[in-house]
Image (spheres, grey):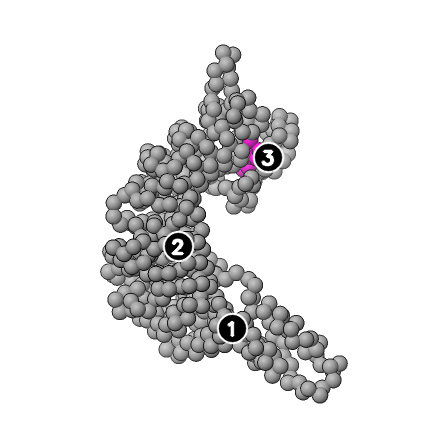
Amino acid sequence: MISCSESTTSQNATSLPPIQSLPAEILDDLFCICCDLSLPIGFDFSSTYRQLSPSSDSSESIQLTALALNHVCTRWRDITLANPKLWSRVEIRGLLEKLTNDNVDSILLLTKLYLDRSEQRELDIVVEFWDTFYAEDEPLEISEALYSQARTFLPVYKAFFDEAHRWRNVFICVCREIFGPNHYDTWPERLPILRHLSIHVYGQSHDVSRLTPPWLTIIDAPFLDTLIHTGHRLCIGSGTSTDPPLSLPGLTSFQFTGSLNNSNLRLASPKTCLTLRNISGFAGSGPITCLANALHIVAPPETTYYEWSLSNTFDFLKLPNLSQFSIVSPHPTKTGREAFPVEELKSFLLRSSRVLITHFTMLDLTISDEEVLSILTLLPSLSHLAIGVRTYDVLVGPIFSQTFFRRLTYYSNQQGDVYSNRLAHLVEFHLGWVHLDAIVDDNPKVKIAFLDMVASRSHPVLEGCSPLKHAYLRGYRSAEDSTFTQQLRELLGDAIKIDWMSRADWSGFGEWRIV
């Protein structure tokens, strides 16, 4: 922090420190940069909590940049007080177990100061307790002692809730008691200008809401664009299950964990991308109609629970507007190939708008190539396909065979009978399988089948078929110099753009290049 002494109006400008000689307008802009007002906000538990253990001396942290600038000198104080925007971002981060009555009183005092000095500006808010997040995205059960400390924070929540009419972007950790009978009138139900809400719920293992999820009631949020819920399950909607469904016309992204239920699924509109993470329960009987146009499922680890969760998720859903669908497993294992519920997925696709699906991703799933082909047969409009594994374990994911590539090849025999016209509209193809470049080099039949498949799609012989424009392939070594890559170049020329990805580049898998 740059410090300076208070200046008098008679002081010569040339004797001022360089920063003090700047016009007030420039300083005001610099202060906005110092307060990070142009940067996105959000939870940072993915990096922070791994560095802070429960024994850390850090008790709490509140963003104090504006307050620090305010105390440098009289001129800086005047500038900061004249700009309420500098006080419109409040970030509180720390460890729940470090809360005491004294530091809660301090946080409450500072929170009210920021809320007061921000006047009626739109608010960006973060309330994050690192020790309420669990590394595997599972709900974290906290002790009674820790829950008691959480209750001491209720006055701070109340101060924020009273200003809900100014919420713009909010990332907030809350205990389930916020939605219980003792505090049913605390959570704000009308959020007139809110754009983004990310809410993480923590609670106790013996909480009765484990059996009956509490309601996060929203009556009005016309501009809500992104809604993310993690932690313990909630029913999100306009009230009880008998109330009219909540309408969120602007919702483009909706992510939730916990359980599938009518109220949550009805929040999606035809413009919504819906993400389901580690679904652990189902309220009511399916299938329930959801209007989302895109569905992304993050499966739990491949255990007995994995198959149960996926099977029931597919049985519970019907998406008549679905055009983009992806399913990934973040923790693949060496379980048997029967673990993935193929027939339930097919039934889901047949119930939904399978003929409208253009983008399809299957990642880190134990599924055979024959099963993959049987699924692709149901998707006649597919234009973007990503399939493969992120692990080096050859027992995970489909084992792509000569037959697999032959079945995706445009080919006519001497009698003119078409061997395959699957994926006639495919323009982008992502394929990742252990050491793909090495595997095809060591298996001539697989390599020839793959080369034939790609070549047939560079200039398709079948009328009405689209040429493949981009292929994204995974290799563990420098694939640019491999024999396989050289053969691809000779065969295709510039007809298809081929990108090789290493393990480090894998994050781009399924991020489409062609719109």
- Kindly report the distance in space between the C-alpha atoms of the residues bearing marks 2 and 1: 29 Å
For label 2, the crowd category at 10 Å Cα-Cα, with few meaning under 14, some 14 to 19 and many 20 or more, is: many
| Residue at 48%, 67% in the rendered image | 122
On the image, which quarter does residue 76 sit in?
bottom right
Q: Secondary structure at mark 2?
A: loop
Image quarter of the N terminus? bottom right
Residue that carries the numbered disc 3 in the rendered image: 498
- Kindly report the distance in space between the C-alpha atoms of the residues bearing marks 1 and 3: 49 Å
**In the rendered structure, which segment of residues is drawn in magenta?**
468-475
Above or below — where is 205 with respect to 426? below
Question: What amino acid type should be assigned to the residue bearing mark 3?
Answer: Ile
- Kindly report the distance in space between the C-alpha atoms of the residues bearing marks 3 and 2: 41 Å
Task: Give the mark nearest the N terminus, 3 or 2.
Answer: 2
**192 relative position to 444: left or right:** left
Choose mark 1 or mark 3, whichever is in front. 1
* Marking on residue 248: 2
Q: Is 481 in front, or is 415?
A: 415
Residue that carries the numbered disc 1 in the rendered image: 87
Position of residue 165 measured from the top left corner of the image (x, y, whole percent): 42, 68
Above or below — where is 253 with respect to 357? below
Question: What amino acid type should be assigned to the residue bearing mark 2?
Answer: Leu
Q: Secondary structure at mark 3?
A: strand
Choose mark 2 or mark 1, whichever is in front. 2
Above or below — where is 85 with respect to 41? below
Q: Secondary structure at mark 1?
A: helix
| Residue at 56%, 66% in the rendered image | 36
Position of residue 46 measured from the top left corner of the image (x, y, whole percent): 46, 57
Q: Is 462 in front, or is 494?
A: 462
